Amino acid sequence: MIADIFVSGLVNGGVYALLALGFSLIFGVARIVNIAHTAFYMLAAYVLYALLVKFAVPLAVAIPLSVVSVVALSMLCYKLVIEPVRQHESAVLIATIALALIFQEGLLVGFGGSFLGIPSAMEGVASIFGVRVSYQRLMILAAVALTLIALWYLLSRTKLGLAIRVAANDQEIANLMGIDVGRVAMYTVGISVALAAIAGVVVAPVFVVDPLMWLSPLVIMLAIVVLGGLGSLKGSLIGAFIIGYVEAITVFAVPAGSYLKGAVALSIMVIVLLIRPEGLFGVVFEEER
């Protein structure tokens, strides 16, 4: 059972890391609490389903096309919906909730409320430490690892990454350095949604697709960013694997644990808020008046 927990926690933690890193990234740069973040994760899964099942597009083309189309939509939504009210936090929060619900209802109308399955990209299983792991899950681990490496390279080795880090640390200094903070924020939205979209397309063949699939990851993602510290990328990465393994232990060790994983994540979030509101690696934000 320990080996099962190890593998399951690693896979779940990797997917949660992509979601939480994207959420923390856009909050750090633009102070946007994007409730629609996991809705873009859902959209990517649906776009992949439509391309593979409805239009018979090859998988190698469908995956990048799904990610690119969802990223383009997110940047359009940012320009039209979020940027005009970006200085008003409550309005941004309401706008992102509205976007998520619009996506949900649109998918209900277009695809119905039934569960949809996507053909697995890779058939067969491998034995790791005596645990049978499907090749699809191994592909998820490989995709997560490559994406995290690419994100690290982007943030630490490119001019855009430098601009993102400066804007996240101090927007006034970024403006003084000649950095267009608004444009950097839009690019950051695209990067953060790309992380969510990649998570969506890699898990879609493993789980069923439905118009409510964004809600459970939203709860877990919020628990992760609260645990790690809102806006902290390191905290989001570590928090994702902590929650991933706590979830795996709950599922394998507790009777009917699969029904309790959301409650466990929320309990962790509440405890962290009570004991250490800034999280493990976050900073205390002064209240703006």
Image (tube, rainbow, N blue to C red):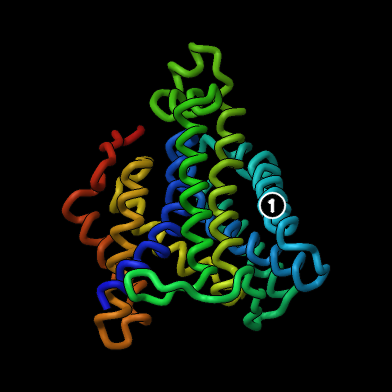
In the rendered image, the vertical position of residue 33 relative to residue 100, given as above or below = above
The image position of residue 141, as x and y in percent, is 47, 59
Q: Residue at x 77, y 62 (%)?
A: 58
Q: Report which quarter residue 278 is drawn in.
A: top left
Residue bearing mark 1: 64
Q: Is residue 130 visible?
A: yes
Q: Secondary structure at mark 1?
A: helix
**Left or right side of 29 for 229:** left
Count of labels in the image: 1
Picture coordinates of residue 26, whole percent (x, y) = 49, 41
How many residues crowd around disc 1 within 10 Å: few (fewer than 14), some, or many (20 or more)?
Answer: some
Quadrant containing the C terminus is: top left
The residue lying toward the viewer, choosing from 84 and 168, is: 168
User: Looking at the image, is 44 positioned above or below residue 288?
Assistant: below
- Image side of residue 156 versus residue 199, left or right: left
Q: Position of residue 258 (x, y in %)?
A: 37, 80
Q: Is residue 90 visible?
A: no
